[in-house]
Image (cartoon, rainbow, N blue to C red):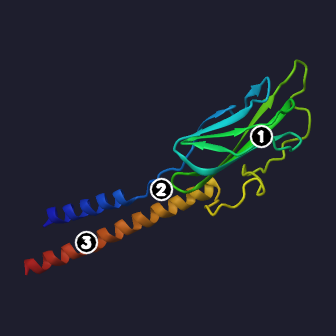
Amino acid sequence: MSSVIRLLLAAVLAIGLALLPSGAWAHAGLVDSDPRDGATLDALPAEVSLTFTEDINPPAYVVVRSADGADLAEGDTTVEGPVVRQALATGEPGDYTLAYSVVSADGHRVTGELAFTVAGAEGADPTAGASPTADPSGTPDAEDAPADGTDDDSESDSDSDAGGSTLSVVLLVVGAVVVLGALAVAVGRRRAR
């Protein structure tokens, strides 16, 4: 009888693990950027790019702000698989912030922020000007990222959603194991009579 119970438990656990949504394990993560966070450049690049761990669902939003708060993003953000690109207008030496808001393949919004400096000509002060005015949460301003009907939770909220999903599946599997175990014990007792 104990081998039957073991087989039932193994089957329920295998099914439960197979049913775990892929989003419960991880969301898209930023693995590379051009420019990199903290980089010092001679001139503002013509475009910025972000590379993630999985494909990104369009639309994606990238905002690049100068120290005086001007948004230098020019045209639409493009998405090619896991790579997001944004063309830039020309800019002066100084500090810049790059904020992004993308939707990962599992449907969760992922946001973040990078900073870089354009040193410019020799002797230019890259720290001149006001501090960056990008939203401290790293999410582009609402007018820069219009509502598109997707979940726009922050990355930490997305992670907690995934944790709740995982917990629900685990509780379901544990409940099924308990019920099947109780049934197996009842059947065993009935046969023993």
Position of 101 with respect to 121 (left or right) is: left
**Residue 66 visible (yes or no):** yes
Q: Residue at x 77, y 25 (%)?
A: 41
x and y, in percent, of residue 146 in the image: 72, 58
Q: Residue at x 37, y 60 (%)?
A: 19
Q: Secondary structure at mark 1?
A: strand
Give residue 176's quadrant in the image.
Answer: bottom left
Q: Nearer the viewer, residue 25 or 134?
A: 134
Mark 2 or 1, nearer chain start: 2
Indicate which disc residue 97 carries: 1
Residue on which disc 2 sits:
24
Tell us which disc is closer to us: 3 or 2. 2
Position of 145 with respect to 4 (left or right) is: right
x and y, in percent, of residue 20 in the image: 40, 58
Indicate which disc residue 76 carries: none
Mark 3 or 1, nearer chain start: 1
Give residue 151's quadrant in the image.
Answer: bottom right
x and y, in percent, of residue 113 in the image: 71, 44
